[in-house]
Amino acid sequence: MSTEQKKPAESLVQQLLAERRELKVLLERARLEVEEARAGSTGPDPRVKAMEAEIERLRHQLATARAEVNLLRTERDELRDGIVRAIAQLNAAE
């Protein structure tokens, strides 16, 4: 083979070797990131318990507010009925 024919093959080999080195570097970076992530994760986030407590408190508050709304609706309806009866009595007395 002449040197002219070897040049494209050598160029391809050099390109593949460079790509291989780059992939090895990327692989090592990924391994380090995984190791770092494992070292940093010691368990569940400690804020989760506080958030769960806050959710429970808000659920209780919502239930209380709904109960108050229902009570106020009942009282409103009773007052409305009383007003209607009072107007009916006034109209009957005339």
Image: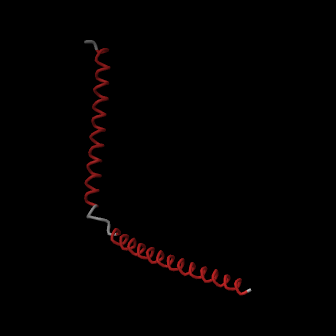
Q: Residue furthest bottom?
A: 93
Residue 23 is situated, as x and y percent measured from the top left of the image, at: 29, 39
Residue 12 is situated, as x and y percent measured from the top left of the image, at: 30, 25
The residue shown at (53%, 79%) is: 72
Q: Toward the viewer: 10 or 92?
A: 92
The N terminus: image quadrant: top left
Q: Toward the viewer: 80 or 34?
A: 80
Residue 26 is situated, as x and y percent measured from the top left of the image, at: 30, 43
The C terminus: image quadrant: bottom right
Q: Residue furthest right?
A: 94
Relative to residue 5, is residue 22 depicted above or below? below
The residue shown at (65%, 85%) is: 86
The residue shown at (26%, 64%) is: 43
Q: Toward the viewer: 1 or 30?
A: 30
Relative to residue 76, is residue 25 depicted above or below? above
Q: Is residue 36 left or right of residue 62?
A: left
Residue 54 is situated, as x and y percent measured from the top left of the image, at: 39, 73
